[in-house]
Image (tube, rainbow, N blue to C red):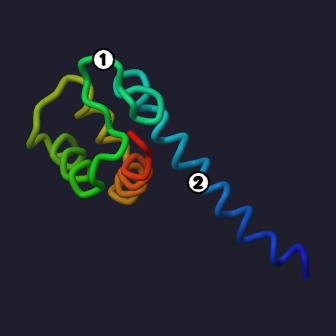
Amino acid sequence: MAVAVGCPLNAHAQDANSIRGMAATCANCHGTEGRSAGTVPGLAGVDKTQIVQQMQDFKTGKRASTIMQQLARGFTDAQIEQIAAWFSAQKK
């Protein structure tokens, strides 16, 4: 019984680590946990809807960019939603 109870928690931890790993791909430009120290905008605490819209605009080519278009195309819509939720939950 204890094993069955522990599985959902383990699955949740794996999902959280996976999402954090996807978000880590953004750290080079947007800073660790989305807290930018440079000229690139930070993502920590930004509204999830805004992040999703920007990512979708990059993904579809509606918004031009040299790097972001390529990165956005590498994520599914569900992954973009997860990454956006993760960044919006971070403190600025």
Relative depth, front residue between 4 and 48: 48
Q: What residue would you read off at disc 1?
A: 38
First in sequence: mark 1 or mark 2? 2
**Residue 55: % across, % down:** 24, 45
Kindly state the secondary structure of the residue where label 2 is placed. helix
Which residue is painted at 24% across and 18% down in the image?
39
Q: Is residue 50 left or right of residue 61?
A: right
Q: Label 1: how many residues lie within 10 Å, few (<14), some (14-19) or many (20+)? A: few
Kindly state the secondary structure of the residue where label 1 is placed. loop
Badge 1 amino acid = Gly
Q: What residue would you read off at disc 2?
A: 16
Badge 2 amino acid = Ala
Mark 1 vs mark 2: in front: 1
**Residue 68: % across, % down:** 25, 31
Q: Is residue 2 left or right of residue 80?
A: right
- Tell me the distance, in whole angstroms, between the alpha carbons under discs 1 and 2: 27 Å
82 is higher (above) or lower (below) than 63: below
Quadrant that contains the N terminus: bottom right
Residue 10 placement: quadrant: bottom right
**Residue 69: % across, % down:** 23, 34
Q: Are marks 1 and 2 in contact (CB under 8 Å)?
A: no
Taking the view exactly as shown, the residue that stands out farthest to the bottom is 1
Which residue is painted at 39% across and 55% down in the image?
85
Which label belongs to residue 75?
Answer: none
